[in-house]
């Protein structure tokens, strides 16, 4: 079922089954976006669950966006950044006497470029063969060792390395093409 149809079923019929399908379809994407900003599994999972809870709780009031991918990218990114800010304040609270170093806010151009790059990264990742993508995510994003991935997937560590090199080469190519187009 297409995303638009799922959203209509969720909104008009309170369809938990359609929502479960949407969850299964988008969980990995939402997690990657949140993890990109938060760099912690637990935080990313919490943000993703909060975003899904918000989508469910606001299903009746929510307008159907023209581009669900862009809409949800912004939704998850903003939720992750808000969560990060909240966590930074919580961790910094006992250290009130230490002056805070402020980093300059990214310019709108940098923000757009970051979004474009992440989108290219994500699309390129989704274009990889399934096993290659799975290995890349386990090693690079989940920080698992070659040996652990090899054992889980019942393959040799050399195969893990070969698949990882293949994934990195393809991702580099896509990102280099992006920068060539910007020059």
Image (cartoon, rainbow, N blue to C red):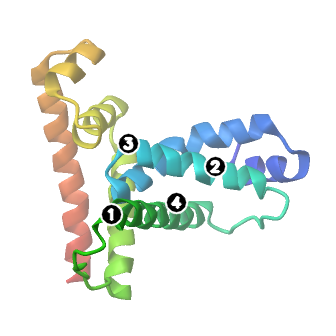
Residue 137 coordinates in the image, percent (x, y) = 30, 38
Q: CA distance from mark 3 to mark 4?
A: 14 Å
Q: CA distance from mark 3 to mark 2?
A: 16 Å
| Image quarter of residue 70 | bottom right
Nearest to N terminus: mark 2 or mark 4? 2
The kind of secondary structure element at disc 4 is helix
Q: Which residue has dot 3 on it?
A: 41
The kind of secondary structure element at disc 1 is helix
Q: What is the quadrant of the C terminus in the image?
A: bottom left
Closer to the camera: disc 1 or disc 3?
1
Q: Residues within 10 Å of mark 3 (few under 14, many from 20)?
A: some
Q: Is residue 178 left or right of residue 168?
A: right
Q: Which residue has dot 2 on it?
A: 52
Any mark on residue 76, and which? 4
Nearest to N terminus: mark 1 or mark 3? 3
Q: Which residue has dot 1 on it?
A: 94
Closer to the camera: disc 3 or disc 4?
3
Nearest to N terminus: mark 3 or mark 4? 3
Closer to the camera in the image, 133 or 46: 46
Q: Residue at x 75, y 39 (%)?
A: 18
């Amino acid at each position: 079922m297409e995303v638009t149809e799922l959203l209509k079923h969720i909104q008009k019929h309170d369809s938990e089954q359609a929502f479960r399908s949407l969850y299964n379809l988008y969980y990995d994407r939402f997690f990657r976006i949140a993890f990109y900003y938060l760099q912690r599994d637990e935080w990313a999972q919490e943000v993703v669950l909060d975003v899904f809870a918000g989508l469910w709780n606001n299903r009746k009031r929510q307008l159907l966006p023209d581009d669900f991918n862009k809409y949800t990218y912004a939704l998850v990114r903003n939720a992750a950044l808000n969560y990060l800010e909240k966590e930074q304040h919580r961790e910094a609270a006992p250290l009130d006497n230490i002056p805070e170093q402020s980093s300059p806010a990214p310019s709108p151009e940098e923000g757009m470029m970051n979004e474009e790059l992440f989108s290219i990264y994500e699309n390129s990742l989704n274009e990889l063969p399934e096993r290659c993508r799975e290995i890349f995510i386990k090693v690079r994003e989940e920080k698992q060792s070659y040996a652990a991935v090899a054992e889980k997937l019942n393959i040799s560590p050399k195969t893990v390395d070969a698949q990882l090199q293949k994934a990195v080469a393809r991702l580099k190519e896509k990102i280099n093409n992006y920068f060539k187009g910007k020059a």
